[in-house]
Image: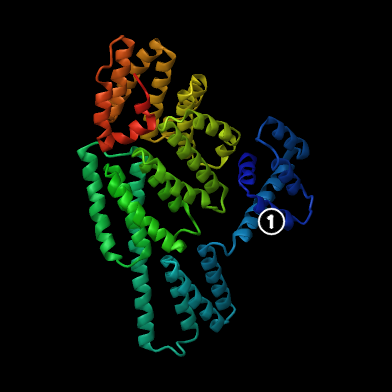
Amino acid sequence: MVPISELYQLIKSLSGPEKRYLQLKAGGQMAGYWQLYHLLEPAGAYNEMVKAEVARLFPGKSIEPARKHLYKVIMTGLRQYDGGKEVETRLWELYHNSKLLLDKGLTKIAARQLEKGKALSETHEKLQFFSLFSRLQMEVIMRQQFADWEEMDIVVLQDENREMTEAAETIRRHAALYEILLCRYWKNGVVRSLKEQTRLNDLVLEEHQLVQKAAGSLKSRQLHLHFQSVYLLMTGDTEGGLQAFHELDQLFQGHSNLWAGNPLHYIHFLNDILQILRRQERFSEMDFFLHRLEALVPGYRSLQETIRLSVQEHKLHRALAQGAEAEVCRLLEAQRSSNEAASDHSSMQDRAQWEFTRARACMAIGKYAAALEIVNSILNLHRESLNRMLYSKYRMLNLLIHHRLGNQDYLYYELRALERKLKKGSAWFKTEKLVADALKNCIHNKPNLHFSVMLQQLQEDPYEQYMISELGLKMVLL
């Protein structure tokens, strides 16, 4: 069972309607487990004061049954609250109901439930469920001793199940390829070598073969456009990526059943297209997709936090790129009170990206101490907590802040350490090397006569656009 610290996080993740539902289910009870809920629910943090109060109310081992039962009650309540909202939940319910009816010998009612389940799973392309319903349907037919079924009918049923199983396996393999590609993109960013390009091409060939096998499937079409858009981003073809994103948007809008139950992929899609638009400084086009992102109301707090942080980060980054200092100050002030709440419900990568842009904003308005505090809090995490590109961005931003502060001695030793680390690991971004060389010139009082020209050349290189945009180097004079 979960420890109290994680039980506290579970309670804090509950939405308002979920809390009200649990209160109604409790019916005004004040049993031990419910006292524990009322102690943890209003707490701003699970700190020593809360721990002491828990120990006072539940001395000795009396906390164990309360903790276990509260967790069970919350999870049961959440399942009941969400029941019927997601297609998977409805399909599991139909499957379990059919199985119970079959066990009771009510084969005709079970058969109707199974047909309903097959139709629903096919409509929403949840083909793994179709196979489950088909196998259970065969048990019903055998229980009826094949009454009203001829041999050819059985063969047709088996062929239908085989086709759906093969289609489900094709989609599973397609999704697996996309997940591998997405992992490489989030971990490593854009392609920087012929070797990485060759590895990508192997994935592209396999993906093309799977697309041919699953022609006509909406799910396969969605996965193909996701795959294509990420591939184009990784290879620096932002125009092609935008075209794929627009096609994907049309698919999402025309078939909301693909994502309504779980909008995570749609959120990723909107974030990617917003990132491309800001890299290309097409700021006026961002509002349309920002409104799309803000209009989403997922049922889970973690996704709500993902959306909130993403919207904040895109708006703040845009204000920075436009040099709108007053807007930067306004956004920082407006978002100050909500930052702490994000820590328990959003992913590490989402928080790190938001904190990076916030640190950049603090540096832009001269709040160097605040910017350094943010950067140090992230760099002090385990190195593995950040993907390669995020880590590199933070190291570069750290150097730029110390340059603004005039910390020459720190820059000298940090640049040497950075050079050793990057040479030992993978190849440098050209942008990283440009910044490092420029800072070394500053330390030795040498002019950076060609910095702007070289930066402009790198800006034309799609592989370096991302780093230049994220660090705001066009706004930084070295």
On the image, the x and y values in percent for residue 402 come to 42, 17
Give the residue displayed 23% in from the left and 50% down from the top.
202
Residue 27 in the image: above or below residue 147:
above
| In the foreground, 300 or 384 | 300
Q: Residue at x 54, y 71 (%)?
A: 94
The residue type indicated by label 1 comes to Tyr
Please tell me how many numbered marks the rendered image carries: 1
Q: Is residue 222 left or right of residue 11?
A: left
Residue at horizontal 56 percent and vertical 51 percent from the top? 300
- Model colouring: rainbow
Q: Which quarter of the figure has residue 250?
A: bottom left
Residue 471 position in % (x across, y down): 38, 29
Question: Could you tell whether 237 is left or right of 55 in the image?
Answer: left
Horizontal and vertical percent position of residue 209 = 24, 60
Relative to 187, does residue 203 appear above or below in the rendering?
below
Crowding at label 1, few (<14), some or many (≥20) Cα neighbours within 10 Å? Answer: some
Residue 292 shows in the view: yes
Task: Identify which residue, 114 or 351, lies in the foreground.
Answer: 351
Of 440 and 477, the residue lying toward us: 477
Q: Quadrant of the C terminus?
A: top left
The kind of secondary structure element at disc 1 is helix
Residue 420 vs residue 141, the one in the foreground: 420
Q: Which residue is mark 1?
A: 21
Q: Is residue 204 above or below residue 377?
A: below
In the image, is 236 to the left or to the right of 339? left
What residue is rendered at 49% in x and 25% in y? Answer: 362
Q: Can residue 176 be seen here?
A: no
x, y (%) of residue 17?
66, 54
